[in-house]
Image (cartoon, rainbow, N blue to C red):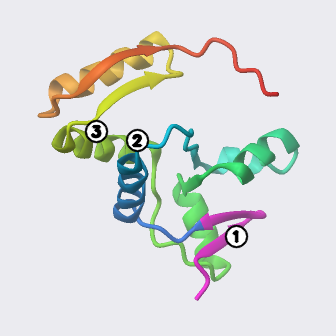
Amino acid sequence: MDTHAKVMGIRFPKRTLNETIEQLSGVIAQNQSKLFHVITVNPEITMACQNDQSLRTIVDEADMITADGIGIVMVSRVKGGNLPERVTGYDTLLRLLESGNEQGWSFYFLGADPATSEQVRGVREKSSISLRCPGASAATRLTLA
């Protein structure tokens, strides 16, 4: 059985949200110093990859991608790839925050603008999640080597 479904040339793993969280929890438990790059690929990113080779390379080289959009899932099903469900970045983040709360992880939010960081803070305050969060910072410019 194939473990991936291809949509517009991008190989999406046939992974549920629960399986994604299990894999990410395992990566975190390994406590490696190496960056583990996760991209939640939505239909817009998938389309952009068709004409932007730099973006396509970033997606292809990511350690994990998820199908962040029902459009990706539906196309996979029509083409026989049968992705089990969409795995959004938002849902993944919330589940990781819950797991992190239970396991005592600390989080540093990198790359969000100040307004997004405030929204994350609001979600944390409204939930039962009590995180160790030493900080957050916005990525104002990204330079690719």
Q: Determine which residue is flagged by label 3.
A: 97
Among the 4 quarters of the image, the one containing residue 134 = top left
Q: Is residue 52 visible?
A: no
Residue at 78% x, 41% y is 55
- The quarter of the image holding the C terminus is top right
Pick the front one: 106 or 130: 106
Q: Position of residue 135 (x, y in %)?
A: 36, 15
- Separation of residues labelled 2 and 3 (CA atoms): 11 Å
Residue situated furthest left in the rendering: 128
Q: Callout 1, which amino acid? A: Lys
Q: State the residue position of label 1.
A: 6
At 72% from the left and 50% from the top, the residue drawn is 61
To which residue does mark 2 refer?
Answer: 90
> Residue at horizontal 49%, vertical 22%?
110
Asked which secondary structure carries label 3, the reply is: helix
User: In whole angstroms, how far apart are the C-alphas of marks 3 and 1?
Assistant: 30 Å
Q: Are marks 2 and 3 in contact (CB under 8 Å)?
A: no
Return the x and y of residue 136 as percentages of the image width and height. 41, 16
